Image (cartoon, rainbow, N blue to C red):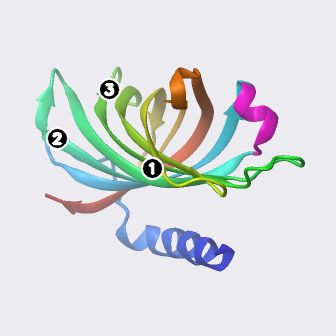
Amino acid sequence: MKCMYHTFFALVFWTQPTFAQTEKPPRGKSYFSIRVAMLAPLGVFDDVYKGAIGIDAIAHLKWLDVHGGEVQIVSGFGRFNPKTGNIFGNITVIPLKIGIMKMISKEFYILGRTGILAVKDQKSSFAIRFSTDAGFGYAFKHFATDIGFHGWARSGGGGYSSYFSAGVVLPFRRSY
């Protein structure tokens, strides 16, 4: 499994100069991007799990104009490793969210998304949970960076699990 992650990261970073845009995505054109992020559990979730690396694919739908923003559809994968003594093992999260990203200046943006999250540990089957995230970022010429807060509802009304993320967003030329 680790070999698969290493291969994926190598492909993303080796092909990025070939496929990535040479300038910021043009306004009004939809495009895809890949986000690679460090994930850090927060609160009670941090008591039993270590940080993780997450990968997201993002569709930026510019043709759905939202007062100068864009609609985004996001899906991805993250796996949190357990701390010592955790009997549930790794936790895998697979989000499917829709939301809005709004440029607040030429470079800075804010975003907010909502949707569902498939969650699975090593002792139980996949469970679907309500999920939200919010964050902000900075767009450079060839890529963007962002930080955000993500959370999902626990089963049985037991509150919320959450994590912080800091990532790099690599836009791809192929627009639609």
Up-down: is 156 above or below 23?
above
Report the amino acid beneath label 1. Phe
- Quadrant of the image occupied by residue 132: top left
In the displayed structure, 27 sits above or below 42; it is: below
Q: Assign the C terminus to one quadrant of the image.
A: bottom left
CA gap, disc 3 to disc 2?
12 Å
Q: Label 1 neighbourhood size at 10 Å, few (<14), some (14-19), many (20+)?
A: many
Q: Is residue 25 magenta?
A: no
Name the residue type under label 2. Lys
**Gap in angstroms between the C-alphas marked 1 and 3:** 15 Å
Q: Residue 103: which disc?
A: 3
Which mark is drawn over residue 143?
1
Magenta-colored span: 44-50
Q: Report the residue at 52% width, 21% height from top.
A: 157
Q: Which mark is residue 62?
A: 2
Q: Give the x, y percent position of residue 145.
A: 52, 41
Residue 131 appearing in the image: yes
Between circles 3 and 2, the one closer to the viewer is 2
